Image (cartoon, rainbow, N blue to C red):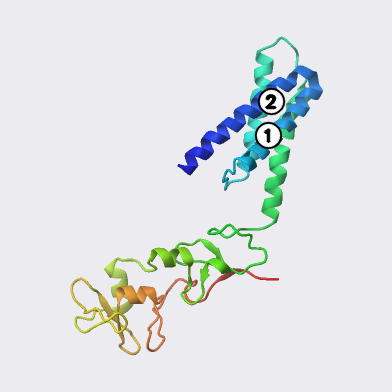
Amino acid sequence: MTQMRNSVLLAALAILAAAAQLVATRWGLVGDLAGGFLSGVLVLVGTRVLMLEIEKTYLMPILAAVASLCGLASAIVGSDLTTPHTAWTASLLAALPTGMTALVTGMRGRRCQLCRMPLRRLLSFCCPRCHLVACENCWQFERDRCCLCEANQIPLFPIDISWWQQCFGTQVQNGRCFLCLRAADGRVAQWACADCGHGQCRSCWDDNNGQCSRCGWIIPNLPPEIGTQAVTGTSP
């Protein structure tokens, strides 16, 4: 629903910007250029007032430029007046306000993909479960995952039993998981630590990021992000 709302409102802003450009052509070349800049300002202010969530900021200058071109084209088609070639630079002026804003935003650096806070002064981490970049406020340090994956219990390892067999070999056929105490049966797959023989069910291995809760042994050939808290940003 949010995406549809954004699309509808952006289309409305583009029409408004094109109309402003069309009206401004009544004042000749100066009006053409001023209308182009006004079109860009309308798109920029409109996105702020309507609080539109635009992830791809580079699309906004393109939208403003296209709206300006449509306004100019409509003016040319609807009249017999000759438009100087310089008037077409109005589309460049239309792209200027939103383009400068996108440039400044890009220079400020990336943002946390969960809370959208700038990462310039915060530690950031690439979550190995969802692969989103999370700031230190959205990161579960003791769990090595972002708060979103923690809340939704997003698994780290594949469900395919062949992957587990490659890592552990044969399943544990009896006994209980040393962590959750669930019995090993056809519904609960259990695997023994290759170092100490400590048995954990698949869910507990996943919850502990592939680490044995007794001896600290880690499943080999894991992604490098696991357990290393891969920092993608640093504090000043």
Residue 154 is at least partly visible in this image: no
Q: CA distance from mark 1 to mark 2?
A: 9 Å
Quarter location, residue 117: bottom right
Q: Mark 1 is on which residue type? A: Leu
For residue 111, side relative to residue 81 (left or right): left
Give the residue at x 28% y 69%. 162
- What is the x, y in percent for residue 91? 71, 31
Quarter location, residue 20: top right
For residue 35, side relative to residue 2 (left or right): right
Give the residue at x 53% y 59%. 114
Q: Are marks 1 and 2 in contact (CB under 8 Å)?
A: yes
Q: Nearer the viewer, residue 77 or 222?
A: 77
- Element assignment for label 2: helix
Q: Which mark is residue 172?
A: none
Q: Which residue is mark 2?
A: 20
- What is the x, y in percent for residue 235? 67, 71
- What is the x, y in percent for residue 208? 40, 77
Q: Nearer the viewer, residue 38 or 172?
A: 38
Q: Nearer the viewer, residue 208 or 225?
A: 208
Q: Looking at the figure, which quarter contains the C terminus?
A: bottom right
For residue 187, side relative to residue 127 (left or right): left
- Element assignment for label 1: helix
Q: Mark 2 is on which residue type? A: Ala
Give the residue at x 61% y 41%. 59
Q: Which residue is mark 1?
A: 42
